[in-house]
Image (cartoon, rainbow, N blue to C red):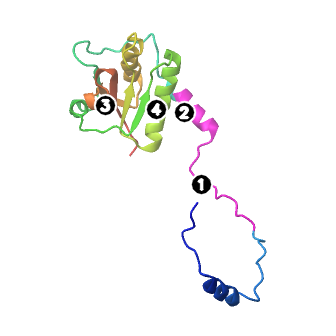
Amino acid sequence: MKKRYQLADEERQIFRESIAGTKPIRQDTVKPPKPRLKRAVLPARRLLQEQVDASFYFSDEFQPLLDNDGPARYVRPDASPYEVKKLRRGDYTPELFLDLHGLTQAQAKEELGALIAACRREHVLCACVMHGHGKHILKQQTPLWLAQHPDVLGFHQAPNTFGGDAALLVLIELDE
């Protein structure tokens, strides 16, 4: 490796004279511990309880009345139908995404419950649930489960930018 800065003999002598009488400093400092980031961590019991509570609403026997014509959509009776129209147009941008690819129905129910609980906890109004195509099992069941949950204001098939007919945009009711 080529040395970039070479000093002439005269410059080296001047440097040695200028530091004459100095002694090396002994390294006696202790490395500071890495700072721990403080974040709002919910107790594991509370998170588990939220998941159990949220997944309680999903039943395979109950079949809500949903339109089979056109894209998957639902609006809660006390909510404005205009909100679902805004979902369809893509006026709402989802802040949380849930990918259900490769999950069983039981796992998908738990994840949906956890998503809704997380949306309420983080004050997220719109979320995207990607169920995929596959064998159409999750594609058929996901709207039925979402329509049963009391915190879901409505949902609509996602626009192509968020997954098209392999995803749903879900509108969550938030506490004031």
Residue 60, image x, y percentages: 46, 12
Give yes or no for residue 39 being in the magenta stretch.
yes
Residue drawn at x 52%, y 24% is 110
Counting residues from the start of the chain, the first of labels 1 and 3 encountered is: 1
Kind of residue indicated by mark 4:
Leu
Left/right placement of residue 28 relative to residue 151 reads right
Q: Position of residue 151 (x, y in %)?
A: 40, 32
In the rendered structure, which disc, 1 or 4, sits on the residue that comes first in sequence?
1
Q: Which residue is mark 2?
A: 50
Which marked residue is nearer to the observer: mark 2 or mark 4?
Answer: 4
Mark 1 is on which residue type?
Lys
Give the magenta range: 30-53
* Camera-nearest label, 1 or 2: 1
Q: What is the distance, in whole Å, between disc 1 and disc 4 at their CAs?
A: 23 Å
Residue pointed to by mark 4: 115
As helix, strand or loop, the secondary structure at mark 1 comes to loop
Q: CA distance from mark 1 to mark 2?
A: 22 Å
Graded by Cα atoms within 10 Å as few (under 14), some (14 to 19) or many (20 or more), the crowding at tag 3 reads some
Q: Is residue 18 magenta?
A: no
Q: Secondary structure at mark 2?
A: helix
Q: Which residue is mark 1?
A: 38
Query: Disc 3 versus disc 2: distance between alpha carbons?
Result: 27 Å
Front-most of residues 63 and 31: 31
**Which residue has dot 3 on it?**
162
Mark toward the start of the polypeptide (1 vs 2) = 1
Nearer to us in this view, 30 or 26: 26
Q: At 34% across and 24% down in the image, what residue appears? A: 167
* Mark 2: few/some/many CA within 10 Å (<14, 14-19, 20+): some
Name the element at disc 3: helix
